[in-house]
Structures are given as structure tokens and as C-alpha cells.
């Protein structure tokens, strides 16, 4: 019998994994966190996710068409969708649609496709988009709404959509109701004014046992999703493990020095975007370090930087900047952390 | 049970072994035609020593060696040589070689030979020669002439490791051999141990072959130098270096050989072949071949004569299923796809795997590398496949070499785990061959340059010599007067001496 005259090469096995499947699983793992997020911070979160995903797919599809790349098969890799969702999760719950759109344009078109598309972008697209927004629209990006249990009023899904597109609030609400600071932001602001942590904590009802109301549960839900990804071996344990341990370590040191001025390690671990960052953002393989040792360094670096930026920087959270800074260092880390090849006593230079 | 170690990386693969082990090894009948390629091994092709129309006996040498790294070939059955043809060999070296076509006469008449009384009496180099002339090569797939491996070359051999790991999915020929003919393996081991003066022999078998382990164990008790060792199932534990790591915890140095550690690794089927060659004077003319995969109706193992067309074996295994679409020689991880089954079984053909579309990736979409590092995790040599991939694409040959491309064992682990379905190994094979080609060219260029430089030098030397001669002559004339006196004096001395001693007179003339 004659077979195909085309040359096939081993290994001849069915595909074990695929990029689409990995991305899809990562998105699935985000769902618990997203659900809790929506539960505590309202429908605006969902509006952000829907709009950002849509914009991301449109932007990616457009660029692919211009670059004459296969649009549908490439969109199927799921990376644009994931970028959209991650960016949405970084935005304040009530964000104008055009802010989201600008973020996506930067994330997908500039940070990803202009560098050559998936796999070639040096910086995490979602975080690039977020940082651009943070720098361009500081006011809009730091206007947070309180967790629902503390809110006097909240919007339903329709109202949330309308707000995003028209900027008009339901009559029973005013802008101050959705212009609060996050717990991390609040703490830093009050510390700067000379209060100590016990005072700040008693002054505001936004805090909870671990960190902030709602925030702690969101972090726990993202942690659960992350652990599931680890269990499925879809992400490498090194980055989240190193990130969380380095953060734990440095925050513990300062906290032991002065617990009235430095937030506790537990607070840091369960506040802001820690868990989202550790399991879903810093683990973006394209922009992280690739060698096993390099990933430990990369994760540890992210953890340290997040802490430093949170404690002494000028922004509400440090995850985005920390990840981008480490993205910048990844090639260097890779270069100096190549594994020693079997059969070589010492590394050849 | 001795302590076992782990080699880095590796992947767990579904075994698919049971589909071909439910039936005993079946002897394939003598085919209508035998196609015996002259190159079935690593090294130079054998040289044909028969003619068209000549009758040959079973076991008769029909291709002899003309080089050190080479193996002879023998007639697998008695019959007539009907043709000697060029044939595109689909194997190991993938270089085409001539094929001797024999029409068997059905008598299967053996060549007469002298039995050997006692191998321990034999000189070791003589023993190696016998193994050499029996055409024995590694039967695990590499087909390297075995006698070379059995030369300890001054090393003290502590361990001879017989590789029965058979870690590639689907293949079960070694398993069946060990189950059904464990004594052949052990008798071969005795001979090899003797040739190498090895202290210990370990037969290493993956734990998924309990029957084989049990069969060997019942015989192994007799010998205190023999251990049968079960090892964990993980691909590619049957790789020479990986196996040594698992059994001893040692790393074979890069560019080195197991011999450097005082070890030799050989396949269990090779041991059995050595047993046949030495104890029964039967050269390597048949082997056990697994015919398997979801593309054949009745997967099983055959003992087939070398030169049997693959299509015959497929027929014997019930033929192709309707959706069979790919024929692989070897296992799915490292095997080679064939374009036709009109190809003979050769010494290296351990397995014919017939696949259906569900068994292979088909035309999987190849996406860009997402730097996920999965390939790094599974590489048993601890290379950085994704890095090598960049360099291969960019054809950065120097970077490829400095990132140790040549340490890649082409196991395919990186490729099977790559979520972007990048055919990484293919890039690496190609990269290696490109670099080889380039080196060959530089070598050729160097030789040419050397030749031309030598020529220039020679010409210059001749010129210089001529010049020197001229100068000397000129000097001679110039110094003619003074020299005349000297000569006269010498002549006078000579004359004086001649009276007494002719010998020294000659010397004197020479000195003048
Ligand atoms: S497994 Fe594939 S996608 Fe992942 S780093 Fe390696 S080559 Fe790139
Ligand atoms: S094929 Fe080469 S690079 Fe890939 S895993 Fe095997 S040894 Fe490593």
C-alpha cells in the first residue's frame, strides 16, 4: 500500500496540549474569582469584562486582517480574550467604555500585535494597557466603589451598562458613591497623614479580618482558581510560589519591625490584586522568564516589587508595575539561569 | 532491589503495548522474494560478494565488510540471487544502498559450520570477530555494529547493562522475546560478559512488563553476576544515558561514552542474536518485529527473516483497517514514516506501526511559541528547546552549538508537550544536518586550501632550491681558486691513505 507521499516527522502522537485549551482553562479558573468580584462590587465588573473581551477580539481580528494572518484560527487561541478579561479585572468597577477601549487598543494593538503577535510581545499586554490607563486617566482609574455590603445604593446590570456608555448615574446615586479609595490606597493615604494602622482600621468599616471587605474573598477565590490550574499543571508552580513567598517574607520583616506602620503579611497577600497577579498575570508564559530557576527569580522579583510599590510608590497597587518591570528583566534572567546540561560538569561559557 | 535514580524531564505516555502482546511470537513464512540491503547499519555499506544467478545457502555471507564500522549481511534463506539493484533504503542512515534480491527455493538449507566447544576458551578478539562476521548490530533501532561496543578498549567494565526498557509506546518485540525466550537473552549475556570481562550484568526492564521480569527472574537466580531490575515507566528511560542515570545515578559525559564510566549498554535482542551467532553459528538473518497500531486488524509480533517485505507482515497481521493512513517504522516518538510498505524488514526494524488519523496530530495548527517552558521541563538532557528553536529558525548555527544542540537525543519529548504544536525535534534534526553539511564543506574547503597551499609551498621550495643551486654554483666559481687548493690537498691526502685503508678513503671523499 502506498501512503501519503508527504514527509511526516516523528513524534507521531496525538497532540497532548494546545494553546487554546490552556487559555480556555485559565479563563475557566478565573470564573470563581470573577463571580465573587461581581457579587461584592456589582454588575459594573461584568460590564467591564464583556466590553473588554469584545474590544479585544475586535482589535486583534482587525490587526490580523491587516497583517493578512488567519483571523479565525488565531482568535481561537484564546489569548486576546484572556487579555481582555485580565484588563477588565484591573479596572474600577464602573469605567467608561472608551477608557476600556483605549486600554484594549494599547494592550492588543501596541503591546502585542505591533511586536509580532502572540509569543513575541515582551510585555504583558493586559498590564501594559492598564498602566497606560492609570497614567493617562489617573482620576478615572482610582475611583472605586465600595463593596456592596457597605454601599448605600448600587446599580443593576442595565444601569451599569448605561453608566459605562453615557456616564449617567441612576437618580438615586451620585458620583461620590463610586469614588472611594481601595483599602490599600486608603491605608497609604492615611499613613502619610500620620495615622497609625490601629487608628485607620477603627476609623473605617472597609477593613475585614484578612484585608478589605470583599477583597479578601475575591483573593481567596482567585487563589482557589490558581490552585486548580496548578493541580492541572497548566501553570508552573514556581512563579506564584516565589511571588507569594517573597511578598510574605518582606512584609513580615517590616511588619515585625513596626506593626503600626506596616501592614501585616496576611493583609498584603489577600489585598488588591495579589492572588490574581500571582496566579494569572505574572504567570503569563510569553512575558515571564522561561528557565526553572529564572521563574523563581522572576516570581520573587514580582513579589518584592509589588510590596515596594505598595509601601512606598505612588500608585494604588503594585502588581502591574511589578510585572512589567520583571518582564523587562526576563531576558536577562533567562540568560543567566540556563540549566546545566546533563553530562556537563560545569557550564560551558 | 538496588537504589534507583531519576533522570531529568521525560514524559509519561500511554503505552498501547497490550494490543500486540496477546498472541505469541509468530514465525513469518519465507516470502516469495527477499530484499537484503547492503547497508542496514551505521557505517559503510557492505560490499556485495555474490553474483546474479548464484545460488546461496541460508546464513551464507553475501555482503562483506570493507571498513571497521560496518557489518556484513547474510542470506536469510537458501535460494538464488536474482538481481542486485539500487534501492531507496528507508532506514537508519536513510542513505540508499544496493539491495540483493534473493528468490528463496523453499528448502531453507543452512550453510555448514563448525560448532564452538567452549567460548571461555576463545580469545576475546576472536570472539568479537565472530560476532562481527555474524553481522550483529544493535537491534534496539540504532543498528550500530555490536563488536565495537564489546571492545572494552582498556577500560575495566563494571556493568554490562542489557536494555529491555522498551520505553517507546506500542513496541513489544523485546517484551515478547524476554517473555518467551529468556534463556536466549541470558545466554547472550554470558557471552557478552565474557567478551567484556564485565563484573556485573543488569537487565533493565520497565515495570510495565511484569511477565518479562518474572520470566528472566526465574532463570537469573542461578547467576550471582546477573540482576534483573524493574525500572519506572517514563519515556525515554530506554535511552542509553537515561538508563545509566536511572540505574547508577551517573551522568555520561557529553561527547563521551558509557565506556568512560566503565559501562556498556546493549539491547536484549542483541544479546539473543549474539547467543544465536556464537552458540548456534547462526548469523543475524531474522528478528522479532512488532506489527501494531490501530491501523492493522490483528496486531502481534513476528519472527521475520531480514528482507521480508513489510507488506507481507501487514498481510499476516490481518491487513490494514480501512482508516489506516500512516506507516511508521519504529515507535511513534522516534520512528520514521514510510511512503510505501514495499520496503524490506532490516536489522533495525523493531516495529511497524500503522496509524489511523486519531493516532497522530495530523495537520495540527502550529502556533507561535508562547514560551511556556513545557519543553524545558521535559527535556531529559536539560536543553532549552524553545531557545534552540529560535536559533534554528534564525539559522544561528553558532548559537545552536553553544546551546548544545548536539546533545539533543531527538527523543521528541519537547514536541509532544508543546501546546503550540511546533515540530521542535524536526527543527533540531534539520539544524544538526545543516551544521554537519557546513562542516563537511569547510572540511572540503580546508583540504582544498591545504592542497593549494602545499602546492604553492612546493613550488616555492623548488624555486628556492634552484636559486640556492645557482648561488652555490656562482659561489663555487668565485671561490674556485681557493677551493682548488683544498681539493688538491684532499686528493693528496686520499692518495696517501689509499695505500692503507680503502674504506676510510671513501669516507674522506664523502666528507670533501
Ligand atoms: S513548549 Fe512550545 S510553546 Fe512552550 S516554550 Fe516550548 S516551544 Fe514554546
Ligand atoms: S528532542 Fe532534544 S531538545 Fe527535545 S526533549 Fe529530546 S533531547 Fe530535549
Image: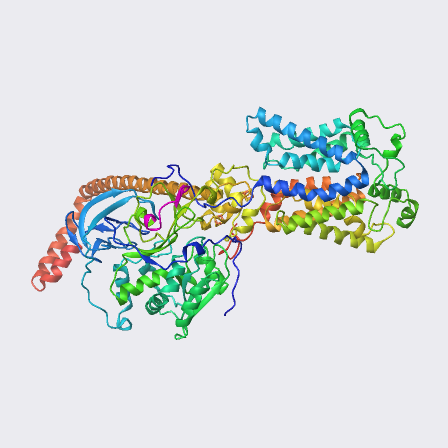
Q: Residue at x 50, y 69 (%)?
A: B2
Q: In the picture, residue B339 is in which quadrant?
A: top left
Residue B378, given in percent of the width and then of the height, sits at 53, 51
Q: Does residue B267 appear in this view?
A: no
* Residue B415 point in image, percent of width and height: 50, 45
* Spot occupied by residue A131 in the image (x, y as percentages of width and height): 73, 34
Q: Nearer the viewer, residue A322 or A174?
A: A174
Q: Which residues are magenta?
A: B314-327
Left or right: B321 as drawn, with respect to A212:
left
Along the line of sight, the residue nearer the viewer: A216 or B110: B110
- The one of B30 and A250 positioned closer to us in this rendering: B30
Quadrant of the displayed image that contains ligand 1? top right
Question: On the image, which quarter does residue B340 sit in?
Answer: top left
- Main secondary structure along the magenta-highlighted residues: loop
Q: Residue at x 75, y 41 (%)?
A: A35
Give left or right: position of B497 versus A23.
left
**For residue B229, side relative to residue A257 (left or right):** left
Which residue ends up furthest to the left in the rendered image? Answer: B499
Q: Is residue B115 on the magenta stretch?
A: no
- Quadrant of residue A323 within the rendered picture: top right
Is residue B390 visible from the viewing direction of this image? yes
Residue B134 sits above or below residue A98 on the image = below
Q: Position of residue A89 (x, y in %)?
A: 74, 38
Residue displayed at 14% across by 48% down: B53
Question: For the point 66% across and 31% down, which residue is it?
Answer: A56
Amino acid at each position: 500500500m502506498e501512503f501519503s507521499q508527504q514527509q511526516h516527522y516523528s513524534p507521531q502522537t496525538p497532540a497532548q496540549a494546545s494553546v487554546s485549551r490552556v487559555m480556555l482553562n485559565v479563563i475557566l479558573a478565573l470564573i470563581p474569582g470573577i463571580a465573587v468580584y461581581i457579587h461584592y462590587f456589582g454588575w459594573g465588573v461584568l460590564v467591564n469584562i464583556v466590553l473588554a473581551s469584545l474590544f479585544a477580539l475586535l482589535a486583534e481580528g482587525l490587526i490580523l486582517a491587516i497583517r493578512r494572518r488567519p483571523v479565525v484560527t488565531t482568535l481561537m487561541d484564546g489569548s486576546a480574550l484572556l487579555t481582555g478579561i485580565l484588563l477588565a479585572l484591573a479596572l474600577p468597577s464602573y469605567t467608561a467604555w472608551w477608557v476600556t477601549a483605549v486600554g484594549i487598543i494599547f494592550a492588543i494593538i501596541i503591546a502585542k500585535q505591533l511586536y509580532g503577535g502572540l509569543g513575541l510581545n515582551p510585555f504583558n499586554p493586559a498590564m501594559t494597557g492598564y498602566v497606560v490607563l492609570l497614567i493617562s486617566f489617573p482620576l478615572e482609574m482610582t475611583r472605586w466603589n465600595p463593596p456592596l455590603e457597605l454601599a448605600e445604593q448600587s446599580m443593576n446590570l442595565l444601569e451599569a451598562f448605561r453608566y459605562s456608555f453615557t456616564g449617567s448615574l441612576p437618580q438615586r446615586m451620585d458620583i461620590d458613591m463610586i469614588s472611594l479609595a481601595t483599602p490599600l490606597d486608603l491605608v497609604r493615604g492615611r499613613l502619610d497623614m500620620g495615622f497609625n494602622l490601629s487608628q485607620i482600621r477603627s476609623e473605617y468599616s472597609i477593613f475585614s479580618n484578612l484585608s478589605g471587605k470583599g477583597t479578601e474573598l475575591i483573593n481567596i477565590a482567585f487563589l482557589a482558581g490558581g490552585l486548580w490550574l496548578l493541580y492541572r499543571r497548566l501553570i508552573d508552580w514556581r512563579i506564584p510560589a516565589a511571588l507569594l513567598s517573597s511578598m510574605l517574607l518582606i512584609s513580615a520583616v517590616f511588619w515585625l519591625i513596626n506593626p503600626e506602620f506596616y501592614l501585616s503579611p496576611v493583609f498584603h497577600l489577600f489585598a488588591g490584586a495579589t492572588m490574581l497577579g500571582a496566579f494569572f498575570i505574572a504567570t503569563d508564559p510569553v512575558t515571564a522568564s522561561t528557565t526553572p530557576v529564572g521563574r523563581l527569580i522572576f516570581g520573587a522579583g514580582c513579589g518584592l516589587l509589588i510590596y515596594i510599590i505598595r509601601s512606598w510608590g505612588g500608585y494604588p497597587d503594585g502588581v502591574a508595575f511589578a510585572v512589567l518591570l520583571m518582564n523587562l528583566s526576563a531576558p536577562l534572567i533567562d540568560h543567566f539561569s540556563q540549566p546545566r546540561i546533563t553530562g556537563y560538569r560545569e557550564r560551558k561559557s | 532491589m538496588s537504589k534507583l535514580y531519576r533522570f531529568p524531564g521525560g514524559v509519561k505516555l500511554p503505552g498501547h503495548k497490550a494490543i500486540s502482546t496477546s498472541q505469541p511470537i509468530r514465525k513469518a513464512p519465507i516470502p516469495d522474494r527477499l530484499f537484503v540491503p547492503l547497508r542496514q547499519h551505521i557505517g559503510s555499506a557492505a560490499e556485495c560478494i555474490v553474483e546474479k544467478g548464484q545460488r546461496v545457502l541460508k546464513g551464507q555471507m553475501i555482503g562483506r565488510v570493507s571498513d571497521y564500522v560496518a557489518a556484513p549481511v547474510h542470506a536469510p534463506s537458501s535460494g538464488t540471487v536474482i538481481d542486485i539493484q539500487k534501492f531507496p533504503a528507508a532506514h537508519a542512515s536513510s542513505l540508499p544502498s544496493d539491495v540483493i534480491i534473493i528468490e528463496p527455493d523453499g528448502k531453507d538449507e543452512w550453510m555448514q559450520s563448525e560448532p564452538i566447544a567452549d567460548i571461555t576458551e576463545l580469545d576475546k578478539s576472536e570472539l568479537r570477530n565472530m560476532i562481527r562476521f555474524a553481522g550483529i548490530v544493535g537491534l534496539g533501532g540504532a543498528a550500530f555494529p555490536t563488536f565495537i561496543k564489546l571492545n572494552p578498549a582498556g577500560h575495566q567494565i563494571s556493568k554490562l547493562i542489557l536494555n529491555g526498557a522498551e520505553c517507546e509506546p506500542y513496541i513489544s518485540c523485546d517484551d515478547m522475546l524476554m517473555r518467551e525466550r529468556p534463556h536466549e537473552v541470558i545466554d547472550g549475556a554470558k557471552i557478552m560478559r565474557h567478551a567484556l570481562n564485565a563484573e556485573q550484568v543488569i537487565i533493565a526492564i520497565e515495570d510495565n512488563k511484569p511477565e518479562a521480569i518474572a520470566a528472566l527472574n526465574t532463570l537469573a537466580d542461578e547467576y550471582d553476576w546477573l540482576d534483573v531490575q524493574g525500572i519506572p515507566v517514563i519515556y525515554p528511560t530506554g535511552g542509553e544515558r537515561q538508563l545509566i542515570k536511572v540505574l547508577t545515578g551517573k551522568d555520561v559525559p557529553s561527547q563521551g561514552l558509557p565506556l568512560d564510566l566503565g559501562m556498556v549498554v546493549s539491547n536484549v535482542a542483541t544479546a539473543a542474536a549474539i547467543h544465536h551467532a556464537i552458540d548456534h553459528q547462526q548469523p543475524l538473518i531474522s528478528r522479532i518485529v512488532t506489527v501494531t497500531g490501530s491501523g492493522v486488524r490483528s496486531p502481534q509480533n513476528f519472527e521475520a527473516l531480514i528482507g521480508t517485505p513489510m507488506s507481507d507482515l501487514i498481510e499476516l497481521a490481518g491487513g490494514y483497517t480501512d482508516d489506516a493512513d500512516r506507516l511508521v517504522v519504529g515507535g511513534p516518538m522516534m520512528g520514521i514514516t514510510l511512503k510505501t510498505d514495499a520496503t524490506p524488514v532490516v536489522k533495525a526494524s523493531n516495529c511497524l506501526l500503522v496509524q489511523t488519523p486519531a493516532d497522530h496530530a495530523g495537520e495540527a495548527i502550529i502556533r507561535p511559541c508562547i514560551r511556556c517552558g513545557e519543553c524545558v521541563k521535559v527535556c531529559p538532557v536539560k536543553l532549552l528547546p524553545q531557545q534552540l528553536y529560535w536559533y534554528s529558525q534564525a539559522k544561528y548555527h553558532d548559537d545552536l552549538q553553544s546551546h548544545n544542540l548536539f546533545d539533543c537525543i531527538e527523543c521528541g519529548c519537547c514536541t509532544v508537550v508543546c501546546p503550540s504544536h511546533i515540530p521542535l525535534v524536526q527543527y533540531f534534526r534539520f539544524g544538526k544536518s545543516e551544521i554537519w553539511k557546513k562542516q563537511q564543506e569547510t572540511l572540503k574547503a580546508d583540504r582544498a586550501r591545504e592542497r593549494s597551499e602545499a602546492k604553492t609551498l612546493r613550488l616555492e621550495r623548488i624555486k628556492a632550491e634552484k636559486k640556492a643551486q645557482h648561488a652555490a654554483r656562482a659561489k663555487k666559481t668565485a671561490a674556485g681558486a681557493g677551493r682548488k687548493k683544498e681539493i688538491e690537498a684532499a686528493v693528496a691526502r686520499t692518495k696517501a691513505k689509499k695505500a692503507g685503508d680503502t674504506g676510510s678513503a671513501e669516507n674522506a671523499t664523502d666528507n670533501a
